[in-house]
Image (spheres, rainbow, N blue to C red):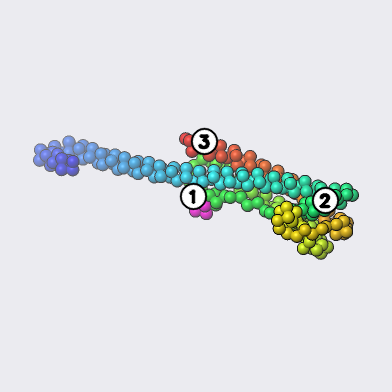
Amino acid sequence: MMKLFRKIRQQLLKENKFTKYFLYAIGEVVLVVIGILIALQINNNNDLRKARVKEVHYLKNIKTDLQINTLELDRYIDTRTEYIESAKRIISHFEGEPITDYSAFNADGVKIYSWQKFYQNNNTFQELVNSGNLALISNDTIKNMLLDIESLYKKMKSEEDHFRFDTETLIYKPLYELMDLTPMVGNFEYFISNGQSGKDVVLSQDFFNEYLKNLKLKNGFAMTVLEFSVMNGQMKKMKRMSQDLMVVIDNEIRE
C-alpha cells in the first residue's frame, strides 16, 4: 500500500500537478490520522472490556462476601436473641422468682459471660480500597451502598465496645471477686454436653446466695437485654442493606 502511495506521489510530481499533489498529501495525512484514531479506539475498547471483566469479578466476590455475612448475621441475631431471653430469666430470679434448675440458671449466665464480637467478611471491599481499585466499580449506587454498610459496621463495633465496657464493669469484675468459677464452668460443660465433658458439680441455692444479692450483676444483665437488643436491630438493618445490595449487583452483572 505504501509503495502505491509513493508511486502516485512521484507521478504527480513528474507531471507538475502540485495542486493535486498537495490535496493528495492532505488526504494521505487524513487517512493516517483516521487509522491512528481507529487503532486508539480499538485499544480503548479492549481496555474497557478488560476493566469490565475485572469489575464483574470484584462484584461477584462482593456478593459472595455479602452472602457469607448474611448467614453470619442470622447466626448472631439468633444467638443474641437467646442471650436476651437468658438475661431476662436471670433478672427474674434476682427479683424473687425461685430457681428450680440451678444448672440451667448457671448455663444462662455463662452464655452471656462468653459472648463474642461480630466480624464481617468484607475482604473484597478492603482489597478494592487498599489497592485503589474502588473506581473500578462504575455503578455509584453500589459504591454508596458498600460505604453505607461499612459505616453501619463501625457503629456496630462502637456498640460492642460499649457493651464490653459495661460487661467488664458490671459482670466480670463482681463475678470474679464474688464467685468460684471452677464449679460453674465444670457444671456448664457437663450440662451442655449431656454429661460427655465437664464435671457433674451440684450447684445449690447457697452457692448463688450472694450472687443474687449483687446489684451490679443484676444491672449487668439489664444492660445485656438493652444493648443486645440494640445490636440485633443494627444487625437486622445490615442484613436488609446487604440483601438490597445483592439485588443491585445482580442487575449490574446482567447488563
Percent of width and height locating residue 72 = 63, 47
Of the pair 11 and 128, the residue shown nearer to us = 128
Q: Residue at x 61, y 44 (%)?
A: 70
Q: Which residue is mark 1?
A: 133
Q: Is residue 114 among what the camera can see? A: no
Q: Nearer the viewer, residue 129 or 209?
A: 209
Residue found at x 58% / y 50%: 121
Residue 213 sits in quarter: bottom right
Q: Nearer the viewer, mark 3 or mark 2?
A: 2
Q: Which residue is mark 2?
A: 101
Q: Which residues are magenta?
A: 127-131
Q: Number of labelled discs?
A: 3
Q: Residue at x 73, y 59 (%)?
A: 198
Q: Amino acid at mark 2?
A: Asp
Mark before the other along the chain sequence, 1 or 2:
2
What residue sits right under mark 3 in the picture?
A: 251
- The relative height of residue 220 versus residue 40 in the rendered view (above or below) is below
Q: Looking at numbered disc 1 in the image, what kind of residue is underneath it? A: Asn
Q: Residue at x 62, y 41 (%)?
A: 241
Expressed as whole percent of the image width and height from the top left, the position of residue 153 reads 64, 49
